[in-house]
Image (tube, rainbow, N blue to C red):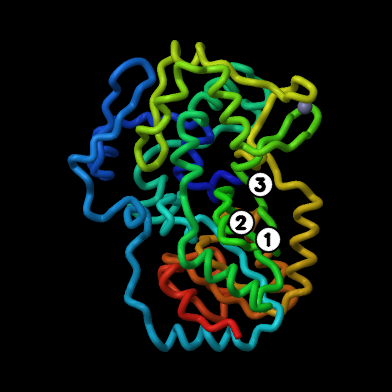
């Protein structure tokens, strides 16, 4: 199955309408921030306990120092490649402050028992959609403010210099697009687009935020004081008062244009990526443990084609045994060192 759940990240999860069942006390300690609820749906950040690590360093697993010989090996791998396909996962965005799921100690699974919303529940239930969108509305300003890190910029530069045949990402955070990548497939969609479940019309997520604000004027001014992961707590009463707009063309229900847990990647998209893999002469994985089949299947295709495979990921992956080169380094430290020419 092509589930997105294990590729997403904690900030995305918050936007997916996931409620944190844990006491927020430990989260506050780990982020070095506290959030004071002043009045109904009003949140204010208190930075008096600011953590010296900063939010971006909190979600990157520890890794050994860069090994110069490994850097040289990756440089050779890239130099020899004429039609390189790169596949990225949540690990490339941790250095932008967006936690992943699986990393030891710092990943979502290690720190919370949050789980993402189910596609079927979202489609079937108007109250579930209302809850989802209320949390998504409050989390959006923080989530949409994340910026590309040097790894995203490096891959965009490789494309500009003609090194990159195609880029496939499992992330829904739009950071490759923000860095300027164009030869790009977002395998699981993108949180920055909204889709009508009835007529299929796509609209920008930013425009929906304005509609939320018009419909919910008492909520709008206070949607900023969030935890670094975009988390927010809302009571039933608050959720039930939240007004959700529908498709302006047909009145249908709206959903982020992402593949939720329990949904599958469109076959057209899968076929398209298979074709790009078959055209490639080598494959580089960046920041993915490849645990989820939706990405792993392209590794299998690359293996069938006997393409050389390199993997840059902190921690083991499902495909380490298939890789001719494995690097346990920070993506944003290593990729800018590689000369793509
Ligand atoms: Zn519609």
Q: What residue do we see at 44% from left, 84% from top?
A: 70
Q: Residues within 10 Å of mark 3 (few under 14, many from 20)?
A: many
Which quadrant, please, contains the C terminus? bottom right
Please say if the residues under marks 1 and 2 sit with CB atoms less than 8 Å apart: yes
In terms of secondary structure, where does tag 2 sit? helix
In terms of secondary structure, where does tag 3 sit? strand
Q: Position of residue 239 (x, y in %)?
A: 48, 16
Q: Position of residue 28 (x, y in %)?
A: 26, 38
Choose between 254 and 262: the one closer to the eye. Answer: 254
The disc placed on residue 211 is none
Choose between 318 and 191: the one closer to the eye. Answer: 191
Cβ(mark 1) to ligand 1 < 8 Å?
A: no
Please say if the residues under marks 3 and 2 sit with CB atoms less than 8 Å apart: no
318 versus 41 height, above or below:
below
In terms of secondary structure, where does tag 1 sit? strand
9 left or right, relative to 156: left
Residue 306 shows in this picture: no
Residue picked out by circle 1: 184
19 versus 269 height, above or below:
above
Q: Disc 3 and disc 2: Cα gap in Å?
A: 12 Å
Q: Quadrant of ligand 1?
A: top right
The disc placed on residue 177 is 2
Q: For the residues carrying marks 3 and 2, which lies nearer the camera in this image?
A: 2
Q: What residue do we see at 43% from left, 36% from top?
A: 114
Which comes before the other along the chain, label 3 or label 2?
2
Residue picked out by circle 3: 189
177 versus 155 height, above or below:
above
Choose between 234 and 50: the one closer to the eye. Answer: 50
Q: Position of residue 120 (x, y in %)?
A: 66, 29
Q: In the figure, residue 199 lies in which quadrant?
A: top right
Q: What residue do we see at 71% from left, 47% from top?
A: 265
Q: In the figure, residue 251 lies in which quadrant?
A: top right
């Amino acid at each position: 199955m092509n589930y997105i759940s294990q590729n997403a990240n904690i900030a995305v999860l918050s936007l997916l309408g996931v409620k944190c069942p844990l006491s927020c006390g430990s989260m506050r300690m780990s982020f070095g921030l506290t959030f004071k609820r002043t009045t109904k749906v009003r949140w204010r950040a208190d930075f008096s306990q600011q953590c010296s690590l900063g939010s971006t360093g909190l979600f990157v697993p520890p890794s050994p120092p860069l090994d110069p010989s490994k850097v040289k090996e990756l440089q050779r791998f890239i130099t020899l490649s004429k039609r390189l396909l790169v596949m990225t996962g949540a690990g490339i965005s941790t250095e932008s402050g967006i936690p992943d799921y699986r990393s030891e100690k710092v990943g979502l699974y290690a720190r919370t028992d949050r789980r993402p919303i189910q596609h079927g529940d979202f489609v079937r239930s108007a109250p579930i959609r209302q809850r989802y969108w209320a949390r998504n509305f409050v989390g959006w300003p923080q989530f949409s403010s994340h910026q590309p890190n040097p790894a995203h910029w490096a891959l965009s530069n490789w494309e500009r210099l003609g090194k990159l045949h195609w880029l496939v990402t499992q992330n829904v955070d739009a950071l490759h697009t923000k860095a300027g990548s164009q030869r790009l497939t977002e395998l699981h969609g993108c949180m920055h687009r909204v889709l009508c479940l009835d007529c299929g019309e796509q609209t920008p997520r930013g425009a929906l935020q304005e509609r939320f604000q018009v419909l919910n004027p008492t909520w709008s001014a206070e949607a900023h004081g969030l935890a670094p992961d975009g988390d927010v707590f809302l009571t039933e009463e608050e959720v039930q008062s939240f007004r959700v707009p529908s498709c302006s063309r047909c009145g249908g229900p709206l959903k982020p244009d992402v593949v939720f847990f329990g949904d599958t990647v469109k076959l057209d998209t899968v076929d398209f990526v298979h074709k790009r893999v078959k055209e490639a002469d080598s494959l580089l994985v960046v920041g993915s443990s490849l645990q989820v089949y939706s990405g792993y299947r392209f590794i299998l295709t690359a293996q069938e084609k006997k393409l050389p495979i390199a993997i840059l990921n902190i921690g083991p992956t499902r495909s380490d045994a298939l890789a001719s080169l494995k690097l346990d380094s920070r993506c944003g430290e290593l990729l800018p060192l590689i000369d793509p020419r």
